[in-house]
């Protein structure tokens, strides 16, 4: 039978994991609204200062993250009416690092309806910082039958 102190330690440990999982899920969920409202500062704030965003074969360094909301392709989405919709992530935490995988899709307004314009696999590598969890690397691949997209979900 565990002692009261051991039970408290176990509860604290379980609570810490639950809080971490919620914080990571909230961080990932905040990406879509940030880019859909073209808030470069909020988008950049999700990453560490040395973080990167890997979009297909392109590596976007932290210094350029705030500007992704002003790229022509992104502006086309926003001006048409869009939603960067992210699925709930599967999260694995190891100490002060974590890996989350999920799907994302861009839903576009076209005429009188909304259509999925892009569907992607995502891998988020996160680290605990003094400010909370932040993205170190996000890798994103469109799901077109390529192995790279499937590998991100592993």
Image (cartoon, rainbow, N blue to C red):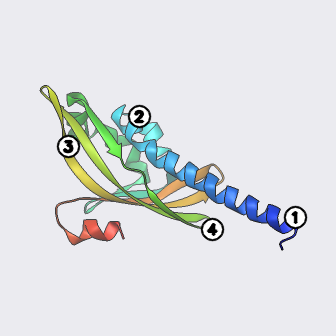
The image quarter containing residue 38 is top left
Among numbered discs 4 and 1, the one appearing first in the sequence? 1
Q: Which residue corresponds to mark 1?
A: 4
Please tell me which residue is depicted at 87% across the width and 69% down the height of the picture: 3
Please tell me which residue is depicted at 50% across the width and 50% down the height of the picture: 25
SS under mark 4? loop
* Number of residues whose C-alpha sits closer than 10 Å to that of mark 2, classed few (under 14), some (14–19) or many (20 or more): some
Q: Which of these two is toward me, 43 or 27?
A: 27
Q: Which residue corresponds to mark 3?
A: 116
Image x and y of residue 33, in percent: 40, 36
Separation (CA) of disc 2 from disc 3 = 22 Å
Image x and y of residue 150, in percent: 27, 68
Among numbered discs 2 and 4, the one appearing first in the sequence? 2
* Up/down of 94 relative to 27, above or below: below
Image x and y of residue 44, in percent: 45, 45
Q: Which of these two is toward me, 50 or 134?
A: 134
C-beta proximity under 8 Å, tags 4 and 3: no
Q: Which residue corresponds to mark 2?
A: 39
Q: Is residue 114 left or right of residue 92?
A: left
SS under mark 1? helix
Please tell me which residue is depicted at 14% across the width and 25% down the height of the picture: 112
């Amino acid at each position: 039978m565990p002692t009261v102190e051991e039970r408290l330690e176990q509860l604290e440990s379980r609570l810490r994991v639950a809080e971490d999982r919620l914080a990571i899920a909230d961080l990932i969920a905040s990406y879509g609204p940030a880019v859909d409202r073209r808030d470069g500062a909020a988008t950049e704030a999700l990453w560490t200062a040395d973080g990167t965003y890997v979009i297909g074969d392109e590596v976007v360094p932290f210094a350029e993250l705030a500007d992704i909301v002003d790229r022509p392709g992104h502006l086309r989405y926003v001006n048409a009416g869009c939603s960067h919709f992210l699925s709930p992530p599967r999260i694995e935490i190891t100490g002060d690092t974590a890996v989350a995988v999920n799907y994302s899709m861009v839903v576009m307004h076209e005429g009188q309806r909304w259509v999925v314009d892009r569907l992607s696999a995502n891998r988020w590598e996160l680290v605990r910082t003094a400010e909370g969890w932040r993205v170190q690397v996000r890798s994103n691949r469109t799901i077109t039958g390529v192995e790279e997209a499937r590998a991100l979900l592993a």
